[in-house]
Image (cartoon, rainbow, N blue to C red):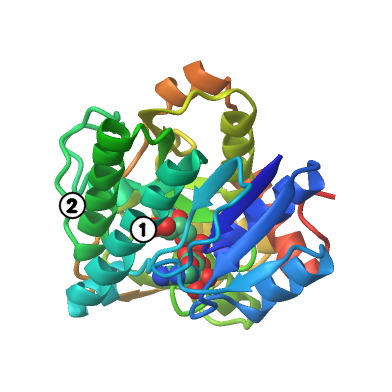
Amino acid sequence: MRILITGGAGFIGHNVALYLRNRGFEVVVVDSLERSSPYALRRLSTYEIPVVNSDVRIFDNYEGFDIVIHAAAYVSVEESIRDPVKYFENNVVSTARVGFECAKKGSKLIYLSSAAVYGEPVEIPVKESHKLNPKSPYGLSKLMSEQVLKQYADLYELKHVVLRLFNVYGPGQNPAYAGAINSFIDRLMEGKPPIIYGDGAQTRDFIYVIDVARVIESFIEEGSFNGAVYNVGSGEETSINALAEKLMNVLGVKIKPIYAVERPGDIKRSSADISKLKEAIGFTPTPLEKGLREALKAFYGGAPLND
Ligand SMILES: NC(=O)c1ccc[n+]([C@@H]2O[C@H](COP(=O)([O-])OP(=O)(O)OC[C@H]3O[C@@H](n4cnc5c(N)ncnc54)[C@H](O)[C@@H]3O)[C@@H](O)[C@H]2O)c1
């Protein structure tokens, strides 16, 4: 089976590419390389995964791909608030293009959406039926992308599935756009205190990038592409303070965090209801501490993740 991954030289894309390649799939990556890391490119090259250097807004060579995983996007909430037009232009137009090419060629599309489409949850854990009220242009660009694909399913019979990812962690995140886990690790490894924005009581649902790859593999193997939407999280709600504690346990260090001003666009609580996903593919998430240990080994110990 041939698989194309857009944004496949980014954090999630390259981990998924490596995982699927190791599972015997033929994988090709298309990426503008604008926000990919040298670490991701090195790993793709080690596994001899072809990388096409192109912006997906103009790329049109979809011939022969059974599945397209659309991961290409700009992903910073903060940057999107500073420069919203850039986010709509890139994220929405990319999806409009990728989706249309898939519909024309009959490729099945797996769209990596985001929990950011929910905004500040009013019911926890968040179900897929929760009200959609994104707080940032980034979140809105992901929601608009979902809507574009839904329309393509109606107009052109696009076969697709939408995965709303919660906070993904693992090796190879671009430091400029990395979430709490990677920035905590980087600072703790240098003996510096982690910086927590706000009081640290805010919660997130952290999901290991290899779990995301496992979910994608299940959809490739057995999922239906009827436009359904699934939360992809761990189902566990963890405060940022608790996360810092856990990471320090794993690393065997103890440093008092520094608290800084809360960032615009940040939500107070987040936790995924993953019962729909479990029912569809029988998924069991990796516990946070185990995932953190594995990710650290891969990133700092040099071991490939799924060997
Ligand atoms: N990281 C998370 O926690 C998270 C959570 C929810 C959803 N997501 C979604 O997962 C996807 C991947 O996120 P990531 O964290 O790996 O981000 P990333 O920035 O590491 O990777 C995105 C990749 O897309 C590429 N790209 C961006 N625009 C492009 C374009 N127009 N054409 C070609 N390539 C382009 C970048 O160069 C980069 O390599 C995104 O769609 C994001 O919205 C991520």
Query: Which secondary structure lies at badge 2?
Result: loop
Residue at image coords 60%, 33%: 220
Q: Is residue 186 left or right of residue 237?
A: right
Which quadrant of the view contains residue 95? bottom left
Contact (Cβ within 8 Å) of mark 1 with mark 2: no
Q: Position of residue 297 (x, y in %)?
A: 76, 61
Other-residue count near label 2 (Cα within 10 Å), few / some / many at <14 / 14–19 / ≥20: many
Q: Is residue 128 visible?
A: yes
Disc ID at residue 271: none
Q: Is residue 248 left or right of residue 263?
A: right
Mark closer to the observer (1, 2): 1
Q: CA distance from mark 1 to mark 2?
A: 23 Å
Furthest residue in direction top, as rendered: 279
Numbered disc total: 2
Residue at image coords 65%, 28%: 221
Depth order, front residue of 243/83: 83
Q: Is residue 159 left or right of residue 23?
A: left
Q: Position of residue 260 (x, y in %)?
A: 29, 76
Q: Position of residue 240 (x, y in %)?
A: 40, 57
Residue matched to label 2: 134
Residue matched to label 1: 97
Other-residue count near label 1 (Cα within 10 Å), few / some / many at <14 / 14–19 / ≥20: some
User: Does 139 sit above or below residue 190?
Assistant: above
Q: Position of residue 204 (x, y in %)?
A: 38, 49
User: Does 180 sit above or below residue 112?
Assistant: below
